[in-house]
């Protein structure tokens, strides 16, 4: 094996990497913008902003070559972003195109109780081919999200979530940290094998339940919902087996996520954060999944400016922030240390794709105005072989000798 | 390497090392393990069926405990390159008490590769000598009537008819239609060392997948097949004239496709062309090689409570007509009842009546009545599940296997 092949193969064997110079191209930046949630358009009906959401079973590809069946709002993962102003009247038509039951819970919003989307607590599930209309006034301001509250263990990790941003025209965060652009990063974790098995079981079960419902033969035991504790206990005595005794609803084991995504994508397809020197960006972090993340940014201390959407009166400066399930955190990053910087979960199990590092929620903060001369790192590498190759005029790996986009080891 | 080792010792040492590796290196291209080439770990299906019964004949008073058909099956399934899948299955069971197959009989030892439209199977597995599974306690309870019988058997072992070494190719035309071709080696009790292909067959099948249980109307299954047993018929030269052709036809009708109170009726006919010259039965070979017409039908009721079968009851009737052998016939009727005691566990009761008349008594007992009280444990699970089944709802409706 010659030197060049050895170098290339040993680098590639360490993990999948993308040419770092590619990320500075205009095309890459345009493509990267598509990796953030698309805003859902609305119609005005009087003073109501009307949105339409559907749910379908579809195939999702978090990284090239890896596909699995999932549940999608408007054929997007995450679902489209609903962005309104504080105090807007919001009406959402939610149509269920699947044979499964669903609801939408507006996580962090102060809706009327019948609009909260918890089946059999404050609404019936939205059944196959049914439409439910959610109506509420948008409050409080800040970063929130919506998700399905039926079969939540599966439906949420299967993809039924999306960002819900309520803007404040008088936003104190923008006043204190004037920023030009913002990003929404929705984190989630997925056990794709669990999703497949559970979806199969739910589909199978719903076939029977739909049949019985058409014939008026549905009863509370099949709903798994009872009018009273006494009814429930009577059903158990007659043979009903609740999930905690014998698992009727789901696979026997709890999900063990093996795919971790930002906006539905895993490294190397996760979205990048672009910034310019001297610029401030706002990053809205949402954890719509079921695992905790400890997000660490290299080379910077960012400001934590909002918690669950609420602006913090005294923003905190940090380089690592916990993002727990169900939480949202807004951070402001100041472009004061130019380069290409890793932004990743420090629980490194979640920067893997099915156990293979690097993957998952690994991404970078990229100074898009980083001069080309600063991207060349061969001269700093200390690698004699690389230097000799450069001297002898060999073409260097990684487009002329820049570093791999991501370090091999944090 | 020890410097004191001479050249000869080094060679011996190296050979010894190679011998240790040989069992692995000699299997195909296996080179995993040490080299760290593990990729996606395979699925690991495990199946267990323990059928134990107390058998009692009320007329003779004979009784015994029977645990034949108890079976353990394990396997591995793997995604291959280019949309193919591969699997290996290994299964064994306790044969009948009077069998001469030893204490364990290997029912399944086969490998299979498949893609969206094709399956290719090689090894020992269920013989294609029936088209339908009737709801009897044991698979072989009505074997004389609902199996095409192996003409190379001596009649002692039912496994001779149930299992075969085979090479099978099935083309899935669509999700309900398939066509299969197979070349088989049936257990040959005439020449035990004969492992060559001794049967060829073709099978056409329409079948509604089990997972579409709520999407079916009356017709559940229709099957047709022809089986050519390649005998060494004395005095006949060509393979066609030496072969015994069996024609099988089957159907399953959903009488009441209600998911809670489900009724179905299944039937199968088998026409064994036989050899014209065999007009008497003095040996088991005569029994399987004379012309016969057998039909078998069963009515089944399934009561599902809370989305799982709680009670299954079925009754069936079979008749076999021997056109060339005077005054000879076989009849059989059964009724059974199974009740689910809990997950994976059933208790059952089966009554079976057999009537063998005429020349068939030369080779078969007239075992008229049998009452069986049974406990059945069954377990079927795929560990480390990584991909979907061909007939899962997701695959049927949204396509997984491509």
Image (spheres, helix red, strand yellow):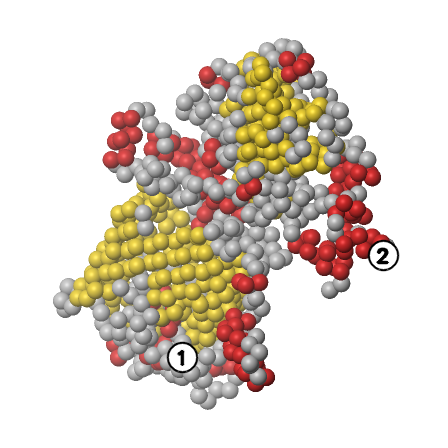
Q: Is residue B275 above or below residue A291?
A: below
Q: Nearer the viewer, residue A408 or A180?
A: A408
Q: Mark 1 falls on what kind of element?
A: loop
Q: Nearer the viewer, residue B5 or B182?
A: B5
**Which is in the foreground here, disc 2 or disc 1?**
2
Quadrant assignment for the C terminus of chain A: top right
The image position of residue B107, as x and y in percent, is 39, 67
The image position of residue A179, as x and y in percent, is 71, 20
Residue A38 tag number: none
Q: Which residue is mark 1?
A: B188
Residue at (47% x, 82% y) in the render: B242
Q: Which residue is mark 2?
A: A392
Quadrant assignment for the N terminus of chain A: bottom right
Are the residues at dot 2 and dot 1 in contact (C-beta closer than 8 Å)? Answer: no
Q: Is residue A271 above or below residue B115?
A: above
Residue at (24% x, 57% y) in the render: B374
Residue B73, located in which quarter of the rendered image?
A: bottom left
Residue A49, located in which quarter of the rendered image?
A: top right
The image position of residue A401, as x and y in percent, is 78, 48
Residue at (61% x, 58% y) in the render: B81
């Amino acid at each position: 094996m010659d030197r060049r092949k050895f170098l290339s193969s040993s680098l590639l064997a360490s993990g999948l990497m993308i040419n770092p110079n590619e990320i500075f191209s205009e095309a890459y930046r345009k493509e990267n913008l598509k990796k953030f949630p698309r805003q859902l358009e609305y119609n005005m009906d009087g003073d109501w902003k009307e949105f339409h959401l559907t749910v379908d079973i579809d195939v999702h590809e978090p990284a090239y070559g890896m596909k699995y069946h999932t549940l999608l709002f408007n054929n997007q993962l995450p679902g489209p972003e609903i962005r309104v102003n504080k105090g807007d009247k919001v009406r959402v038509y939610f149509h269920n195109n699947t044979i499964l039951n669903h609801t939408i819970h507006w996580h962090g919003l102060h809706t009327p109780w019948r609009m909260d989307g918890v089946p059999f607590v404050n609404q019936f599930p939205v059944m196959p081919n049914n439409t439910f209309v959610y109506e509420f006034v948008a409050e409080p301001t800040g970063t929130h999200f919506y998700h399905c509250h039926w079969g939540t263990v599966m439906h949420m990790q299967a993809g039924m979530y999306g960002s819900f941003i309520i803007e404040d025209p008088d936003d104190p965060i923008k006043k204190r940290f004037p920023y030009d652009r913002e990003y929404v990063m929705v984190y989630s974790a997925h056990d794709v094998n669990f999703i497949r098995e559970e979806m199969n079981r739910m589909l199978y079960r719903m076939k029977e339940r739909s049949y019985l419902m058409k014939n008026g033969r549905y009863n509370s035991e099949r709903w798994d919902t009872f009018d009273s504790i006494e009814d429930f206990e009577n059903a158990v005595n007659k043979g009903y087996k609740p999930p905690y005794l014998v698992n009727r609803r789901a696979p026997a084991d709890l999900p063990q996520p093996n795919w971790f995504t930002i906006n539905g994508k895993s490294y190397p397809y996760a979205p990048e954060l672009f910034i310019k020197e001297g610029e401030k960006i706002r990053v809205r972090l949402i954890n719509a999944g079921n695992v905790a993340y400890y997000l660490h940014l290299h080379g910077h201390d960012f400001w934590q400016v909002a918690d669950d959407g609420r602006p913090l009166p005294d923003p905190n400066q940090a380089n690592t922030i916990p993002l727990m399930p169900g939480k949202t955190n807004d951070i402001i990053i100041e472009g004061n240390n130019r380069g290409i910087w890793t932004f990743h979960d420090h629980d490194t199990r979640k920067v893997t794709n099915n156990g293979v590092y690097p993957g998952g929620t690994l991404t970078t903060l990229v100074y898009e105005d980083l001069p080309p001369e600063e991207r060349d790192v061969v001269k700093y590498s200390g690698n004699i072989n690389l230097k000799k190759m450069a001297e002898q005029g060999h073409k260097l790996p990684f487009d002329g000798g820049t570093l791999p986009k991501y370090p091999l080891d944090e | 390497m020890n410097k004191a080792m001479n050249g000869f010792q080094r060679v011996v040492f190296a050979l010894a090392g190679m011998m240790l590796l040989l069992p692995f290196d000699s299997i195909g291209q296996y080179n995993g393990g040490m080299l760290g080439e593990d990729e996606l770990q395979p699925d690991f299906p495990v199946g267990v069926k323990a059928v134990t019964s107390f058998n009692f004949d009320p007329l003779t008073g004979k009784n015994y405990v029977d645990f034949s058909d108890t079976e353990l099956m394990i396997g591995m399934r793997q995604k291959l390159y280019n949309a193919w899948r591969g699997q290996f299955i290994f299964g064994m069971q306790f044969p009948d008490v009077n069998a001469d197959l030893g204490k364990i009989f290997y029912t399944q030892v086969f490998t299979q590769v498949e893609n969206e439209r094709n399956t290719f199977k090689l090894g020992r597995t269920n013989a294609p000598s029936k088209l339908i599974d009737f709801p009897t306690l044991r698979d072989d309870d009505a074997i004389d009537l609902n199996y095409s019988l192996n003409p190379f058997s001596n009649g002692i072992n039912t496994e001779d008819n149930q299992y075969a070494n085979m090479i099978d190719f099935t083309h899935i035309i669509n999700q309900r239609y398939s066509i299969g071709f197979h070349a088989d080696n049936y257990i040959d009790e005439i020449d035990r060392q004969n492992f060559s292909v001794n049967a060829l067959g073709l099978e056409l099948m329409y079948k509604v997948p089990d997972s579409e249980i709520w999407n079916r109307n009356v017709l559940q299954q229709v099957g047709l097949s022809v089986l050519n047993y390649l005998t060494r018929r004395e005095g006949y030269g060509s393979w066609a004239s030496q072969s015994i052709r069996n024609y099988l036809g089957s159907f399953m009708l959903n009488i009441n496709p209600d998911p809670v109170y489900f009724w179905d009726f299944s039937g199968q006919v088998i026409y064994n062309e036989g050899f014209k010259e065999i007009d008497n039965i003095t040996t088991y070979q005569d029994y399987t090689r004379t012309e016969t017409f057998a039909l078998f039908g069963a009515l089944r009721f399934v009561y599902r409570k809370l989305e799982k079968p709680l009670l299954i009851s079925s009754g069936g009737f079979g008749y076999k007509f021997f056109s060339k052998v005077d005054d000879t016939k076989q009849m059989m009727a059964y009724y059974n009842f199974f009740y689910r005691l809990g997950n994976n566990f059933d208790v059952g009761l089966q009554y079976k009546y057999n009537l063998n008349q005429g020349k068939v008594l030369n080779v078969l007992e007239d075992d008229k009545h049998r009452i069986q009280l049974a406990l059945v444990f069954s377990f079927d699970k795929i560990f480390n599940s990584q991909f979907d089944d061909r007939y899962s709802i997701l695959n049927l409706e949204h396509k997984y296997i491509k």
